[in-house]
Amino acid sequence: MSTERVAATKGMVQKAREQLGFLERGSEVLKMKRDQLAGELNKLLREQGRRRAMEKAFAESFDSVKGAYAVLGYDAFASAASAVRPMEASGLPTSIVGVIMPEAKVTAKPRPEEVPSATVRKATAKLGAAVEEAVELAVIEAKVEQLAWALMSTNRKVNALEKVVIPRYKDMIRYIEDKLNEQALQEFFVTKRMRDTTRVERERSRTLATS
């Protein structure tokens, strides 16, 4: 907003002060949101260290599956595997500091004890645990990405308010106040001049009346 186009009135300066107060409060709220987002992001980033263990678990589970296949052969392995209850998961978005976050939970797990073959039971248990861990890590990584974007967006808004918008309003308020002070000073001198002129005229009239 260009200060040259601003009407230098008391109403305008009052409105500008109210808007500045609103912007400053908004900036503080955004800072708190930014801090909360950063805290949540840091927590999730620490959880990402589980990926290496998850990858190792997958490698071990696949070795177990291959071992069971080698022992049983295709038909027996397929028959035993068909008895494994499939894993199920459901997703429901959640909110963290107003940011919509993905969420998924395993709702049904395989039951290795129902499998007749010991080798397939072992493979089922290992693979099921690895897949469940993979689901949890996928949710964590999706949340990290979402929080990172939200944090960058919030930080840009804070910077825009603090470095551009708020200083502009402060400059506008100073400009209006300077103009109002200048007008008040001009009015003072005009009023004083008129009073002095009036006093001189009265004294002259009184002098003429007495002469």
Image (tube, rainbow, N blue to C red):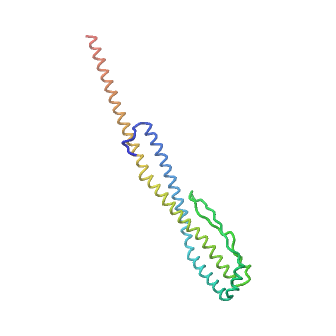
Q: Nearer the viewer, residue 25 or 129?
A: 129
Position of the C terminus by quadrant: top left
Residue 110 horizontal/vertical position (percent): 69, 75
Q: Residue at x 67, y 89 (%)?
A: 71
* Position of 128 relative to 40 (above/below): below
Q: Residue at x 27, y 16 (%)?
A: 204
Q: How many marks?
A: 0
Q: Nearer the viewer, residue 206 or 23?
A: 23
| Direction from residue 81 to residue 55 in the image, left or right | left
Residue 4 horizontal/vertical position (percent): 36, 42
Q: Nearer the viewer, residue 211 or 153?
A: 153
* Position of 94 relative to 113 (above/below): above
Q: Residue at x 59, y 64 (%)?
A: 102
Residue 101 horizontal/vertical position (percent): 58, 62
The furthest residue to the left: 211
Q: Residue at x 57, y 56 (%)?
A: 98
Question: Which picture quadrant has residue 104?
Answer: bottom right
* Position of 128 relative to 173 (above/below): below
| Direction from residue 36 to residue 75 in the image, left or right | right
| Direction from residue 12 to residue 109 in the image, left or right | right
Residue 146 horizontal/vertical position (percent): 54, 63
